[in-house]
Image (tube, coloured by chain):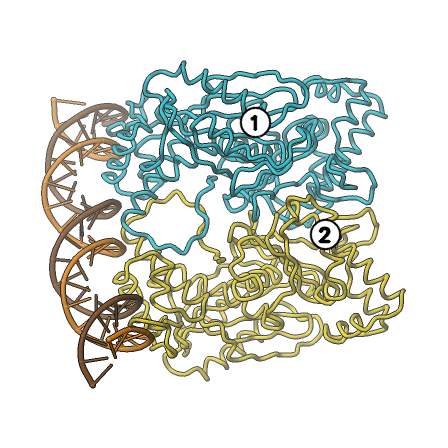
Chain colours: A cyan, B yellow, C brown, D orange
Amino acid sequence: MVSNTGAISNRGQSSDSVRQHNLSTVLRLVHLNRKILRSQLTSITGLNRSTVSALITELEELGLVVESESQGSSGVGRPSLMVSPNENVVAFSVNPEIDATTVSVVTLSGQVVARSRKLMGSHPSPEDAIRVSAEVIAEMRKSFRPGTQIAGVGVSVPGQVRTSDGVIRYAPQLGWVESAFATALSQETGLNVFLGNDASLGCLAEARFGTAKNVNDLVFLFAGSGGIGGGVVSNGMTVGGAAGYAGELGHMKVSSSGRLDYSGLPGTLESLVRREDLLDFFKLYVATDEELDAEIKSSESSRAKRLIHDQLDSLAEGLSNLVNIFNPEVIVLAGFLTSLFEFDPDYLLAQVKKGSLAAASERVVIRNGALGSDLLVLGAAELPFDALISSPSSYNLKSAYATRVESGEVDSR
Amino acid sequence: MVSNTGAISNRGQSSDSVRQHNLSTVLRLVHLNRKILRSQLTSITGLNRSTVSALITELEELGLVVESESQGSSGVGRPSLMVSPNENVVAFSVNPEIDATTVSVVTLSGQVVARSRKLMGSHPSPEDAIRVSAEVIAEMRKSFRPGTQIAGVGVSVPGQVRTSDGVIRYAPQLGWVESAFATALSQETGLNVFLGNDASLGCLAEARFGTAKNVNDLVFLFAGSGGIGGGVVSNGMTVGGAAGYAGELGHMKVSSSGRLDYSGLPGTLESLVRREDLLDFFKLYVATDEELDAEIKSSESSRAKRLIHDQLDSLAEGLSNLVNIFNPEVIVLAGFLTSLFEFDPDYLLAQVKKGSLAAASERVVIRNGALGSDLLVLGAAELPFDALISSPSSYNLKSAYATRVESGEVDSR
DNA sequence: ATCTATTTGTTGTTTAAGACAACAAGTATC
DNA sequence: GATACTTGTTGTCTTAAACAACAAATAGAT
């Protein structure tokens, strides 16, 4: 079970903080499970039935959860009530890309209920992306039904994000440098804005809702046209580092090769496992992952096989290192790495084991991500949801209809 | 502030667990600071003065802490009482090596009050080490003053330890494979026995008492005659991995070199940064770290300098990767790496920055460890102390005088 | 030396919230 | 339809932290 809260603290606990903690715990379980029986909440939390009842009542009054009668019998005894997130609680997910910016609406129950992709001129500036995002958000808010509560905005950034103030430090593909993105978007929208690295958010999403559900130690590797990003969950918590820049797994040097990656570092995983190289070989241009996948799957020539195996070898070297470093339970692959993996799953696993210590790799499993195109949308939405969940009774939810004077708060993960 | 507790849990908090948590918090602060004012405890924990008073009283009744009048004025107002760990609370630290086993006694206040190093024949078996350790422990217990309370035994293992059951999975230097060390030593001593990887424990010690005090994100790298080990603290918690094998930083591949490390992996940090190579060059045999350090410091020949810089280059490659992966606040070096670093500190830092992303490395600091020969002794003792601190009122402390029927519990980190 | 302001420790009371117990409600099995 | 079983609800109990008032100990001002 993965959650971002729970950092070490020397604070003591008053009875008030106990209530907050228990409200958080219940709301988190409801959110992570999408729906859950009251009886399950009591057994998982270890709290008394009456206590859970009181907590749910409070969350219901806050408009965060709803109860319903569970359909379908569950055995002897009075049937337990089903608790689910209130569909009126939503977050915006903003995903800037090189040629477009996508804004989505995600409910606390994990449904993507709206999506709008705005094509942008080549090399949009951060200001462009902020303006377009704010416009789409304003438009979408008009269509919300009355009573909708907005937790905030989560932004997935293909680059390095400083946690403390939501500044985009450097996003190579977009060419963005040192942009106070969170502050600006917050001013435009009046909503709380949270930023996160795209791969780290993908990792979070897979750990909470995807193929690594309930996994406490996992390594996530994502490769797209912009290079290789990564994320790590250790001990149930995202590895963020001192400033939030941790998880740059693609820039790990594994070879003496002089090939440079997109950040100019030689011999790194990103410099050796390249989507471009495969596209070149197959003579594909601006292909989708699906098209590339089809080509890889149908590869018959020994030259193609050799190229793919070379990439698998390099990938394995990187994964071996990560196994030695993190001893993960699961490795999750996403982007075109899924195609490489599927081409010869046993080979990749064998090579990873060969390059790592027997103890560290003996139980590791490699899997493809399960969330597909929702990966970053769900991941980014988790940022505002986390903030809400960590203080359910005091979090400042915003209404659908923007009031001019409202001002958001800036933060990120 | 670094602590090992605090893993994510979906448990709720009853008033009982609040008390446990607050007792733990206070005891942890007392332990980590060696001594601390009551007024500081109230401000750090945020608890009410009267609550802190009650908590300390309970810890005092448990024999875990003592209060004393603080000497030296601290300003206006009634002087606050000093709280320190009870000197009667101790743990044993066991450090098996290739040719000897060292048993030490550490107080809850972090003092090493006894040490006994037993030379052993070449290639001792785990059983030999267990027998010798148990004998020394039994002997030492006799000399304890009445009222001494023993938290347990911490063992630093130069190899891979399975957390769940305290089994040594593989310790290459010692030639130990799959040994149920914790269970056996617990049976012999009647004490709770906890195992940990040596480098991970060193990391823990430096993070709590050494040069990385109050650092939440740090990477620790230790190099001795047996190779390179590592440890990582992220978000204030030790990175342990799914089974406890995480932190094998020395086996990270950084080059295409075919040189093998002590575990047979090619091109790894451990295969390139080798104490042996330096000893060979300086024509030293079985030298101490101090002797090697003196040679490195006084190196004048260009051949020597080149060799040292080559090792620094390789070290930098490894550290660059770790910076990209963990974005640590501090990198701590120990073993003969301290000599390499001191030979040219600016060079190493410059090379590390060159090989890593600017954002991730912009604030990183490299330091030598501060604990010297106490490193593993203190680190191992933290394991039983952690267990005690996490449940102060219910932990089963053992008395100095062994009673035959007592049986310990086995666990590890 | 005395008085005042300040900080800390102590003690008795209040308050918040989880535990507990008893009962009601709803389902499956016999 | 009776019984066993599980869950939800309600009122009471218990625990522990907060709070308030006072005592103790110090520094500085008069």
Q: Which residue is mark 1?
A: A370
Relative image position of residue A267 (x, y in whole percent): 78, 41
Give B277 or A250, whichever is nearer the viewer. Answer: A250
Disc marking residue B352: 2
Give A408 or A356, whichever is nearer the viewer. Answer: A408
Relative image position of residue A116 (x, y in whole percent): 53, 16
Which residue sits at x=26%, y=64%?
A: B54
Letter of the chain that mark 1 sits on in the rendering: A
Q: CA distance from mark 2 to mark 1?
A: 36 Å
Is A5 displayed left or right of A99 in the figure? left
The kind of secondary structure element at disc 2 is helix
Which residue sits at x=56%, y=61%?
A: B212
Give the class, few, some or many, for how many residues have Cα within 10 Å of label 2's Cα (few <14, many ≥20). Answer: many
Letter of the chain that mark 2 sits on in the rendering: B
The kind of secondary structure element at disc 1 is loop
Q: Up-down: is B404 above or below A319?
A: below
Q: Amino acid at mark 1?
A: Ala
